[in-house]
Amino acid sequence: MPEARLSRVSSQRFLPAFKAIAVALCATAFLLPGAQAAKKEKPAAAKAAVAKKAKGPVPVEVKRNAASSKTAAVAKRGGRAEKAERAEKVVRGGRNVVATIHKKNGKTVVAVQRRSVVRVVEAPPRQSFGQMAGLHGTEDALDLKSSVALVIDQDTHEVLFSKNDHAVLPIASLTKLMTGLLISEAHLPNDELITITQDDVDTEKRSSSRLTVGTTLSRGELLHLALMSSENRAAHALGRTYPGGLTTFVSIMNAKAKMLGMKDTRYVEPTGLSSRNQSSAQDLALLVNAAYADATVRSLSTSPEYQVEVGNRVLQFNTTNRLVKSPDWEIGVQKTGYISEAGQCLVMQARVAGRKLIMVFLDSAGKFSRIADAERVRRWVEATHSVGSPAASSRNAAYQVAG
């Protein structure tokens, strides 16, 4: 027993010495590569000095080359040393924290980096006036996506379908139907050349246009583009060059609306880009009826496509209403419109199931929903309101159309 205790005491006495030896061995292993590299560099430097004395003065260019080579060699060695020193370990501490561990000047360096997380939140789509007024909560038998709708027989003035038809809302480019009607009725020279100016550029919605400033087209061409492809600069230029100027033209727009019996309608400019251009479905039915009576408006608004020469280029324009090209439809006059405040809008005169109908769709929620609504109405009329079918229910009231 005493011998065993003595042996244990002796081993404990030498434990610090063992630790010191272990530390020394680790330091030697870490520093030895650097010392060996320095040792190798000294004979090389001495040899270079002897060679320099033997050869005499070295030309400047050679000196430069040698310096460059020396710099490159040092950089290379330094790069190796740095690379060896930069041997690092990456440790992740969660989703947003990364720790990098490497050795620098013989010391272990731990760099902790916290990543900033940027979350992009999309702004909610801007609501239309109809949505803000709660009109989309109104249910109807056809499940239309338009919050406002009106379908009437142009000849008998019978209301076949109505939904929020008294609501006064922005009408977007449906405005151009009044613009085109007034230009046509004014009988101004269609071949008169009009140049697009900076005044015609949209500063309210900043919408784009293929009619750049300086483009010169005839009044007839601009009227065609305004009614068929809803060209904003074309419509503005038509109003700006009207006798008396833009202010006079807008006042005539409002006077014409009053003359047609459009009691809820107001215009402030000729394109529809302003949300202050407002009307109701009942008023717009009166406008469609008046526009249908004008042969020029009928022809240009239902044109499927049109080409204009601008300088050395030929620009192709197409209708904004794809129903114009559909064999299922016989459309007499039409106009589409859209701004965020108005939603998707569409007015038409069309022959369906042997009846001449005026259709108004305002504030439709989706890009193609106004077209889908028109298709629903067409199928419904064909199924229930064809010529010779039983009369509409007593809920449908008579509706007078001016003209």
Image (spheres, helix red, strand yellow):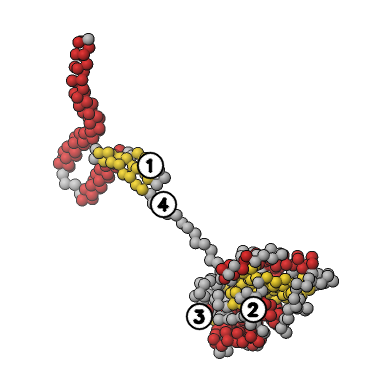
Residue type at mark 3? Asp
In the image, farthest residue toward the front:
394
In primary-sequence order, the first of circles 3 and 1 is 1
- Depth check, mark 4 against mark 3: the one in front is 4
Q: Marks 4/2: CA distance?
A: 51 Å
User: What residue is at 19 percent from the left and 38 percent from the top?
Assistant: 45
Label 2 sits on residue: 177
- Residue 355 on image: x %, y %: 78, 73
User: What residue is at 74 percent from the left and 67 percent from the top?
Assistant: 378
Label 3 sits on residue: 199
Secondary structure of residue under mark 4: loop
Label 1 sits on residue: 93
In primary-sequence order, the first of circles 4 and 2 is 4
In primary-sequence order, the first of circles 1 and 4 is 1
Residue 307 shows in this picture:
no
Secondary structure of residue under mark 2: helix
Q: Residues within 10 Å of mark 4 (few under 14, many from 20)?
A: few
